[in-house]
């Protein structure tokens, strides 16, 4: 949380717990925080709202946002971060006419931008690629092929189809099964 936001909340500075551990990240600079403070955060709107007591690190440094929520709050709220819904932030110092010109330019040239890995030209698998490392001559330890219930088999097929369509994985052929698929339920029970 930025120091300006904290001052705007008009909370007594006596509630700040001192922290002297520096951290890095704001444009490569080392920042020593003013301390931490625990505040209630209300997420959602009534009747589907929740209040979570959250610890904020107070920083006297220029920030792009007033408050940055960390993983503990997101985990407690069972929130899922979606990069799909993020938007482009256009500078505050621009006048309204200039903002409209930039938005119009982006809208007119929407086909120029890469929206997924498949849209990036020259994206070579030689830069980053995962392979199973199998040393020849060593006896493989393999799992027995597991049979899945029909609804689980359908979930596996749907996930594999999504990964194939996104070009995140590709088909390969191994002579024998090495390991089974492991299904893990998401926090929302899917």
Image (cartoon, rainbow, N blue to C red):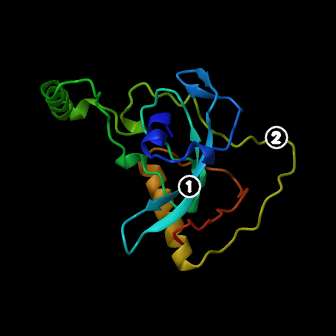
Q: Secondary structure at mark 1?
A: helix
- 79 vs 113: above or below: below
Q: Is residue 77 visible?
A: no
Q: Secondary structure at mark 2?
A: loop
Q: Which residue is mark 2?
A: 136
What is the distance, in whole Å, between disc 1 and disc 2 at their CAs?
Answer: 47 Å
Of residues 154 and 73, the one drawn nearer to the viewer in this rendering: 73
What residue do we see at 17% from left, 28% from top?
105
- 103 vs 54: above or below: above
Work out whether mark 1 precedes mark 2 in sequence or the reverse, and give the earlier one: 1
Q: Which quadrant of the view contains residue 92?
A: top left
What residue do we see at 55% from left, 33% from top?
59
Q: Which quadrant of the view contains residue 36?
A: top right
Locate residue 34, reporting x and y percent: 61, 34
Of residues 34 and 137, the one drawn nearer to the viewer in this rendering: 34
Locate residue 77, reporting x and y percent: 52, 62
Locate residue 63, reporting x and y percent: 46, 31
Of residues 81 and 58, the one drawn nearer to the viewer in this rendering: 58
- 10 Å neighbourhood of mark 2: few (<14), some, or many (≥20)? few
Is 92 on the left-hand or right-hand side of 145? Answer: left
Of residues 136 and 56, the one drawn nearer to the viewer in this rendering: 56
Q: Which residue is mark 1?
A: 73
- 10 Å neighbourhood of mark 1: few (<14), some, or many (≥20)? some
Residue 171's disc number: none
Say which of marks 1 and 2 sits in front: 1
Q: Is residue 167 visible?
A: yes
Residue farthest left in this picture: 97
What residue do we see at 49% from left, 42% from top?
68
């Amino acid at each position: 949380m930025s120091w300006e936001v904290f001052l705007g909340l008009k909370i007594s500075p006596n509630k700040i717990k001192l922290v002297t551990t520096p951290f890095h990240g704001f444009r490569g600079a080392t920042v020593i925080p003013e301390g931490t403070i625990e505040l209630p955060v209300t997420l959602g709107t009534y009747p589907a709202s929740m209040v979570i007591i959250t610890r904020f690190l107070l920083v006297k440094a220029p920030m792009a946002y007033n408050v940055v929520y960390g993983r503990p709050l997101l985990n407690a709220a069972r929130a899922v971060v979606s990069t799909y819904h993020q938007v482009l932030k256009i500078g505050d110092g621009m006048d309204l006419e200039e903002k409209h010109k930039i938005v119009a330019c982006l809208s007119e040239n929407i086909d120029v931008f890469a929206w997924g890995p498949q849209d990036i030209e020259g994206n070579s698998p030689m830069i980053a690629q995962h392979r199973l490392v199998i040393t020849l001559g060593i006896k493989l330890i393999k799992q027995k092929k597991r049979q899945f219930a029909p609804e689980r088999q359908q979930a596996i097929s749907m996930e594999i189809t999504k990964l194939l369509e996104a070009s995140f994985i590709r088909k390969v052929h191994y002579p024998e099964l090495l390991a089974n698929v492991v299904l893990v339920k998401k926090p929302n029970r899917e």
